[in-house]
Image (spheres, grey):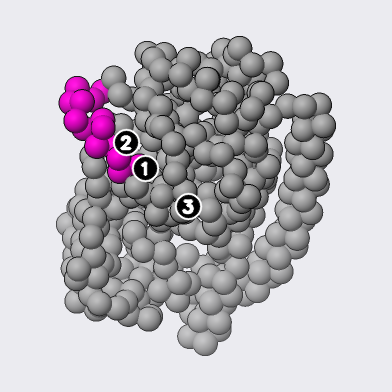
Amino acid sequence: MSENRAIVAMLRKPREKFWRLRLGELKKLAFAAGYEVLGEVIQIKEAPKAATLFGRGKIEEMTKLMDELKVDTLIVYNVLKSIQKVNLELLTGRRVIDRYDLTLEIFAKNASDAVSKLQIELARIQREIPYVKLLTSLIHIKDRPFIRAGGEYGWKPKIAELRRRMKKLKEEIARYREEKLRQIMERKEKGFKVVCIVGYYNAGKTTLFNALTGCEKPVSDMPFTTLSSKYAKLRGAEKILLVDTIGFVVDLDPRIIKSFEINIDDMRFSDALMLLLDASDPAELFKIKVETSLNILKNVGALVNGKPIVIGLNKVDLVSDRIDIESKKIIAKEIVEKVLKRDPGSIVELSAKERRGLDNLIEKLISVLKV
């Protein structure tokens, strides 16, 4: 069996909307992390089982399917509690990861700078400590090694080691953050206005950033290619800086967002936000992505004090139906009004790849920033 071969599983409520779209997003993330998804198991249930998430019969179904397909990894859409993760591993005899773990695996795969690596390690350790603590208690109670245990007494010192490492990571990240905030304040004192390009992964943020600044940052359709923020001057406006930063994903765990505090500071301390949306998305997925992006921005404090938000509808070159484009603009405007309680104004149509609509976008940014 191979850990690169997996099945996905999801617990959903009977009347849950758009679950198929959400499961599809999980499969995309799994592919980005290097997994070959060979099957899926769905359970429809009003409430999860406290100890295992899924019912016993459904777990037996998963185990049988994994036996048949010769896979060694179970990827669960729902975020698992430590007890659920441990019990699923015991009952299936497989490695079990959830959406949180999967997202961190992709982050780790794409991280190239020291700050990103530190933040990813911190998020992993914070996730691992309760899991390891639970394993410790189970190993001692049952007096036997666990499926992935390194010996009965190997876990206790590991918890202490993880806590020491977590403390050190927090101190290092705090130093980086202090330096980052100093740089942000320094730019503001020099009269620069900062626009942070935000939005869902694969909306074309980095392509737009390159087109507007002349930079040549790597571009990929895989999620989370950009983990570290980059600043550059907007062409035609010497006092406006653009920043390209981490992308969003549906149902992104708040604990992961909290771990990337340094990246979130770029959004919080910007003078305006440029929210980029993908016009080629199906309508229902488009709605989910707009709501996800706005709610994340709102929850991290990036939209306080009526901060201007400019909305760009990107990839219009991939949409031949004019009615579809206008429909997406109406959807985006209605969601902004519902979530933020304000009118976003006109939405700029763009094709960052073909460099269409860039002049209109630059004019809009200059206008809202009053420079």
How crowded pointer 2 is (Cα within 10 Å; few <14, some 14-19, many 20+) is rated as many
Q: Residue at x 34, y 33 (%)?
A: 278
| Region of the chain picked out in magenta, as a range | 318-333
Q: Residue at x 66, y 69 (%)?
A: 159
Q: Magenta residues: mostly which secondary structure?
A: helix
Residue 126's x, y, as percent?
A: 61, 62
- In terms of image quadrants, where is residue 230? top right
Is label 3 in a helix, a strand or a loop?
helix
Is label 1 in a helix, a strand or a loop?
helix
Asked if disc 1 and disc 3 are in contact, CB closer than 8 Å, the reply is no
Q: Which residue is mark 3?
A: 340
Q: Which residue is mark 1?
A: 333
Label located before the other in sequence (1 or 3)? 1
Instruction: Tell which of 278 and 170 is nearer to you.
Output: 278
* Res. 49 in view: yes
Residue type at mark 3? Leu
How crowded pointer 1 is (Cα within 10 Å; few <14, some 14-19, many 20+) is rated as some
Is label 2 in a helix, a strand or a loop?
helix
Asked if disc 2 and disc 1 are in contact, CB closer than 8 Å, the reply is yes
Is 199 colored magenta in this rendering? no
* Res. 63 in view: no
Q: Which residue is mark 2?
A: 329
Residue 242's x, y, as percent?
A: 61, 26
Q: Residue at x 68, y 63 (%)?
A: 162
Asked if disc 2 and disc 3 are in contact, CB closer than 8 Å, the reply is no
Q: Which mark is residue 176?
A: none
Instruction: Tell which of 358 and 211 is nearer to you.
Output: 358
Residue type at mark 2? Lys
- On screen, residue 81 above or below 203: below
The answer to whether residue 147 is left or right of residue 9 is right
Residue 241's x, y, as percent?
A: 65, 25
